Amino acid sequence: MDYLHKEYTDKVQSDNQIAEFLQNTAVDGLWYWDLKQQENAWINDQFFEAIGLTAEVFAGMENNWLDLIFPQDLKKVLKLIHHLVAEGEFIFDRTVRYFHHNGEIVWMRCRGLIFCDEQGKASRMVGAHINVTSEKVNEINLAQKIKRFNQIIEGTGLATWEWNIEKGSLLLNDNWKKLLGYEPHELKNATIDWWTGHIHPEDLAIIRSLLLAHFKGEIEKFELDMRLRQKDGTWIFTTCKGKVIKRIRGRATLMTGYHEDLSAIKKSEAELLHYQDLLERTNKVAKIGTWEVDIIKNEMYWSKETKQIHEVDENFVPKITGGIQFYKEGVNRDRITSVFNLASSEGKSFDEELQIITQKGNLKWIRTVGVPQFLNNKLVKVYGVFQDITERKFQEEALQASYNQTKLFIEQAPSAIAMFDKQVNYLAASKQWIKDYQLDDKNLIGQSHYTLFPEIGEDWRKIHQEGLKGKVIRTDEAEFKRADGSSQWITWEVRPWYNAANQIGGLLMYTADVTPLIKARKEAKLLLDVMTEQNERLLNFSHIVSHNLRSHTSNLSMLIDLMEKEPMQDTQESYFPMFKKATENLAETIRHLNEVANMNRQSNEQMKRLNLREYIQKNISSLEASFLEAGAEVAIEASAEATVYAIPAYLDSILLNLMTNAIKYRSPERQLKLAIRVYEEGDKVVICFEDNGLGIDLKRHRHKVFGMYKVFHTHKDARGVGLFITKSQIEAMNGKIEIESEPNVGTKFNIYLDR
Amino acid sequence: MKKFDLACLIDDDEIFAFGAKRIIEMSEICHELKILKNGQEAIDFLVPRLDEFTTRPVFILLDLNMPVMDGWQFLEEFTAVAPEKSAVIYVISSSIDPADIERARSFNRVSNYMVKPITKDSLQSILDEELNR
């Protein structure tokens, strides 16, 4: 091949153009090929080196250089040369495979210059090699990868798109079409304008600005949540991720990307944000722990606070099933299992207040909030917060229990009791209350007291307000006049009630109709009066028997005893007047005794309408001898028609007693003057006895004027029974007696009796 | 033998006073008998003479129910001023009311309570009792 080398050298030396071309291109070998005898070519050392040979080794081999070329590629090279020459082209550029000495394939980019002879036939070609093996291998691997990725994409259901930016055309895969509800055969000629028309108008502005930034290279990836309109017109949430994959002179020409359907998890995400925010805020004020269940890794995480609530030490590693075991067996554990399963299967968040038993065996109320988190429509995590609400819950429970107890107590109370809130709305009322105030049992709770009783005045509202300020207001027997004039007595009380925090929660009202009680008490008082009266009379009776009656009988027996011891003639003279007097006294006392014993309040049936003047005159007549002996002057002022409603025997006794008194206690210094006047005063008739006798010192004796056996004079006949009996008889006939007197001037009695 | 220089009967009952005077005279227990109609008369008579009674005590028969000043009032007023040994007091009443008897006994100075009527024998026996103390 020396001739070729010589010829090549000559050409290079004689033609600068060739030299320059070779310098620019020769990297991995030079060759000069005889196209007329194709097995002949000159190859430089670099060429041999690129395929793992040397000129010496090659010389020792029986092959010519054509054997080094991939046979298929050689055919193509020859074909191309022929084609080029026919077309009048002389520049050859083709990648050709060579066999490396170790058996591997070497990719060479061959660039050559074809020379023709005088007949225009290709005779020689000079060329150079660039080893492009590594690039070629990469290219193949890449193609394989792309093919594999495409298979994966189709398999996983990822909705992909490819946007030819220059042409404005879109290439959408079947998943993409499916995402928007289209069939695979549709949208064959989709354009970017069509797509733009299916993006929510509100999202367009931000999409444009992000795209621009990405095209300029300011952001590495295009990534955004956007809303797309489905074939049926409904909107779906998607996340769109994309990247420019081809640029021409810096200009983006091709971009690809994919969509994720967010609709199912968009809501959860919003909740997630809400709870993350809640967490941040509440963690500052309350001791709230967090927890997280990683579904993929099947791991559970508890924050420090969550561990403290469970009363486990800081190194405790919770397990998913173990976490559930802390919940109290039964309702609580069943509930957490159920809501957690719903969260993981249907993506539902939960917020529960449940009971746990801590590691140390304590019962606690906790609030657990769980939010599922999705990635590519797949649940990856459930996480949330965990709070110890024991104190609040126990307080609530205690409050509820105490409220329920109170409510039950009130409802069952045998009295009229009602419980109100601070606005005086009903919380509870006893059956008696509902009955007493004629309320509707069913719709009572929550109603305003003032709405039900619009007639309640300011005075009561004021009392209620006092009660709400903490005062207890009570009246035992308030008298209310009924419309019919009768009286009703009510005992009522208004007092506050206190909640668990010891704050006033509202009012308790209690009312009781004590009218029957008051009536019974009045009756009892009346009975007691009668009893006292009767008892007093009995005592008087006993006093008369034990004292007066005895004093006369003892006198008589004393006289008899003395008479036995003394001579007869003496007794006749001195003892007889004594006997006479003693027996007279005895007779009078027995009469008094009879009057006292007969005094009877229940003698109304004996009451009669009597002519007063007749009775006065009758009694004066019976005392005529006494009046004459005393030289008395009696004046009567009474109309013939004056009547009195009285018991005849009592009226006689009263008149007789007062007249006898006037005679007995007349003044020895002046003539007795007795005036008896009768006049009417209201529904009473007044009988007035006025004398000018000894009188009584009322300053000293007023309290005992009408007492039993009170004697105010040293008068020999004073026995002190008369006025007592007179007064008792007057009172028995529903009347009264008054006295006015001045010592040594006279006495005036006024007797009031029914007409 | 006369036991007392002076005896006083305080009673408003003329019949009783008549009988009692006879019995006391027959019993010969005193040189002099004074009859007084009520507590006030008795106070007026006795209090100015209290000096005389320091050596020879006065014997008092006292009724309870009397006008002006009754026996109870007399007891209170008299015992307040009279030295202990100056009088021997007997309550004498027709009342058999246990309350009266009890009340009379509540006065330390009252020697005994006699229920009317009194006789020469009953008067004699209480006097013996008194002297044997």
Image (cartoon, coloured by chain):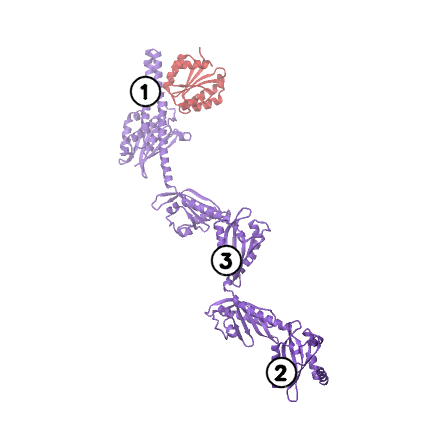
At label 1, which amino acid type do we have? Thr
**Same chain for the residues under marks 3 and 2 in the image:** yes
CA separation, marks 3 and 2?
71 Å
> Distance from label 1 to label 2 (Cα)?
190 Å
Identity, as a three-letter code, of the amino acid under mark 2: Ile
- The residue that mark 1 highlights is A583
Label 2 crowd bin: few (<14), some (14–19), many (20+), radius 10 Å: many
| Residue A65 shows in this picture | yes
Q: Colour of chain B?
A: red
User: Earlier along the polypeptide chain: callout 3 or callout 2?
Assistant: 2
Q: Is residue A484 above or below residue B70?
A: below
Residue for badge 3: A343
User: The residue tagged with tag 2: helix, strand or loop?
Assistant: helix
Q: Chain of mark 2?
A: A
Q: Amino acid at mark 3?
A: Ala
Q: Quadrant of residue B27?
A: top left
The first of marks 1 and 3 along the sequence is 3
Specify whether A29 is left or right of A677: right
Q: Is residue A88 above or below residue A264?
A: below
Task: Please state, as top left, top right, bottom left or bottom right, where the C terminus of chain A lies in the image.
Answer: top left
Calculate the distance from the C-alpha at mark 1 to the C-alpha at mark 3: 120 Å
Residue B104 image point, x, y percent:
43, 22
Q: Which chain is purple?
A: A
Residue A491, image x, y percentages: 41, 42
Q: Which mark is residue A81?
A: 2
Question: Is the N terminus of chain A in the top left, top right, bottom left or bottom right quadrant?
Answer: bottom right
Element at label 1: helix
Q: How many marks?
A: 3
